[in-house]
Image (cartoon, grey):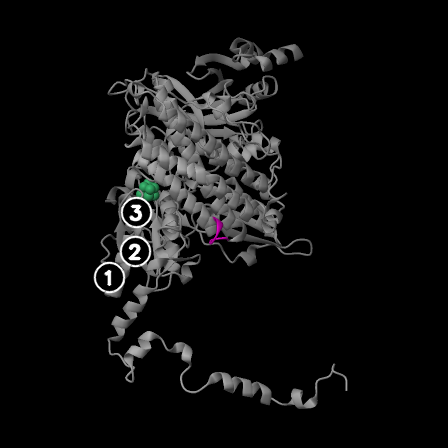
Amino acid sequence: MSTQKEELEIAEGGVDYDALEDRLGDTAIDRESHVNAEGFVVRPDEVQDALFALRDDAGFDHLSLVTAQEYEDRYESIYHLKKFDDPTQEVSVVVPTTKDDPVSQSAEPVYRTADWHEREAYDLVGIDYDDHPDLRRILLPETWKGHPLGKDYDQNKPQVVSFKQHANPLKQDHKDAESDTMFVNIGPHHPATHGVLHLETTLDGETVADVEPDIGYLHRCEEQMAQQGTYRHQIMPYPDRWDYSSAGLLNEWAYARAAEDLADLDVPEYAQVIRTMGAELCRIAGHMLAVGTFALDVYGDFTAIFMYAMRDREKVQAVLEDLTGQRMMFNYFRLGGVAWDLPEPREEFFGKTRDFLDDLPEALEEYHDLLTGNEIFQSRCIDTGILEPEVAKQYSATGPVARGSGIDYDLRRDDPYGYYDELDWDVITEDGCDNYSRVLVRMQEVEQSAKVIEQCVDLLEDWPEEERDIQSNVPRTLKPDPDTEIYRSVEAAKGELGIYIRSDGTDEPARFKIRSPCFHNLSVLPEMANGEYIADMIASLGSLDIILGEVDR
Amino acid sequence: MSSDNPRESIVGSKAPQNKTRESRMGEGVDNRFNSRLREAFGSTPFILTKFDKFMNWVRGSSMFMLQFGIACCSIEMMHTYAVKHDLDRFGSGVPRASPRQADVMIVPGTIVSKFAPRMKRVYDQMPEPKFVVGMGSCTVSGGPFQEGYNVIKGAEEVIPVDIHVPGCPPRPEALVYGVAKLQERVANGESAPVTVKPYELERFADLDQDEIVDELAKEIDEETLVMRYNWTDSP
Ligand code: SF4
């Protein structure tokens, strides 16, 4: 057994699917090929066996996404597994269930993060998960009727949404000699929740006894919208609106990468450099917003750091506007390249970008003086909101949240795309696991992004004029082969942003599923906040840097 | 005599304090109130205007915003408040965290079914007179998400809107213009007609009986407030 385990774990240069199939034995009843990985078909009552085997014996410790979908004749849940050590090693577990009795075993005992995913699958598609700790709607209101991504959903049916008043909290609350709990609603309209998030918080004195995020106040049907759009042009504007902290190009890249690999399109090198530069500019804008609003959360600083962060964001947005024509919703990537070349006169654009980069070290110095070097800030952030790496992995947290807990995971390096592997930059990790580390990671990532942009500008300046191809040849209507499935992800500002697409031979995707990093990052909040002070919970929430548009999609 | 105990003549007498105060007060009106404008009125410091007009002018010149973020547009709204665009220059840029202190609600984003009743409640909590600026295409019609199963087709389905600022998202300059327009209208005493019959919060027991209400009768208490969406009737 142990030798087999080693074999499965080492699997240099890719996964040995035959060995995996042997290990799964009778649990796998069939095998499918997806573009990104092989999928093993598993009976709905053996999901946990299969997943335990893959996690414990083959090292697939990262449940990246759960996709649920309805076919003409069946429901299907797909568990997309990866390894934190090497995300290019992937495998999928496909669980079909019948139409009459769509019950499938829950994966929650194996991966904690399956909890929210399966609730979402139940909510939107209508699959039941056996053995799930708490299967209720997550995005839509509890009184909703029907499952909107199912096949026979009638969108014109009226719906009733209740507005439950909370009875006098004190009456319900529990008060005796030992404890004294009070129920508090934080949100959905609250300045500290960064948007429309509702935290159902039970307090025991000043400590958080229990907190439960209630999401769905910004569920804008992004997946439905994408499924109604054509690959070539109609989908690209939507990714901008997932993570809307001006991080649009990073999101567009997620869609571009998935669709390009699905339809087998090339991207000219010149366009890849432009993409890389634009994406890193977006990352700076996103991290600046995170740092500014975090200062606002931690000590209500609406005057200095928030304003400085906004000042620097204005500069990035000005550069991005020159490049793409928009301040936030860029819609600049095209399948097979980008929409247009750098603005003329190029020297001016390069000059402006360089000016921004030259000013950046000084600005960061200022942030460090005001923020990380500040004693009040340190006492609020160091050793609060502890997130152990093991917990983070269980919830599939990624991005700066995972890297602040010492998990060395960055898709730009580990699963390279674009031009990143040609450039010289570092992945930042911090081992503190606390709010402070997460801020430090973001601030250092800004430096690294600046380094990447600088190298891209150098490259673009010297690019020979006759080789400036911004787009490859792409058919006017794109119709990938029917029943091709792909799951691809990129490193967005908040972490691993993935897209699953299944094509059905038409020019619109049959299923379009978004893996949102914020969704996972938010789901760890109870682990970080329970038993801590309420003020630290607010700081932890800020340090997770969630964008509700991406959480709810 | 120990200096630890002050002399009786000091402790018992109010004279030193009174003297100080009188010498500070000086004669006539306190000098600090005398502005240039006051001087211009000279010896007849009276102006004549209609009370309503005066009130409207006051209202329009100092508007308190509700700090209210919903979706992507709220990022541009933050930029509007922050350096560079600085909405405060126009006397309307101090966001209040509580609806009870706010005059204007900028609705910055997509409204979905779960949020609409909450937004209605926040609006109800604002004291009269209150005004609404709808920011972005989402508050005009649902914007890019108009066809979504969960998306309210414009803020006017829920609350009355005075000014619409279209765009996705509108630039900060556009929002500044929208707010300035609102101030102008308020100062002129104009009000916006309500064009759409909005969704209301109603008691569950007051809803018309139909299939869906029957189905929900087990789950929802009669007294609970609900909002009922008729997607087909939405514009
Ligand atoms: S109008 Fe556009 S930018 Fe504004 S909230 Fe709607 S989608 Fe977002």
Residue B139: numbered disc: 3
Going by the numbered disc 1, the residue's amino acid type is Ser
Q: Is residue A59 left or right of residue A458?
A: right
Q: For mark 1, name the chain.
A: B
In this rendering, is residue A220 above or below A277? Answer: below
User: Where residue A35 appears, x then y in whole percent?
Assistant: 41, 16
Residues drawn in magenta: A301-305
Q: Which element type, helix, strand or loop, lies under badge 1?
A: loop
Q: Residues within 10 Å of mark 1 (few under 14, many from 20)?
A: few
Going by the numbered disc 2, the residue's amino acid type is Val
Q: Is residue B191 left or right of residue A35?
A: left
Going by the numbered disc 3, the residue's amino acid type is Thr
User: Where residue A322 appears, x then y in whole percent?
Assistant: 31, 36
- Looking at the image, can residue B203 be seen? no
Q: Are marks 3 and 1 on the same chain?
A: yes
Residue B191: numbered disc: 1
Mark 2 or mark 3: which is in front?
2
In this rendering, is residue B190 above or below A16? Answer: below
Mark 3 vs ligand 1: CB under 8 Å?
Answer: yes
Tell me the distance, in whole angstroms, between the alpha carbons under discs 1 and 2.
Answer: 14 Å
Looking at the image, tell me whether mark 2 or mark 3 is earlier in sequence order.
Answer: 3
Tell me the distance, in whole angstroms, between the alpha carbons under discs 2 and 3.
Answer: 15 Å
Q: For mark 3, name the chain.
A: B
Looking at the image, tell me whether mark 3 or mark 1 is earlier in sequence order.
Answer: 3
Q: Are marks 2 and 3 on the same chain?
A: yes
Q: Which element type, helix, strand or loop, lies under badge 3?
A: helix
Tell me the distance, in whole angstroms, between the alpha carbons under discs 3 and 1.
Answer: 19 Å
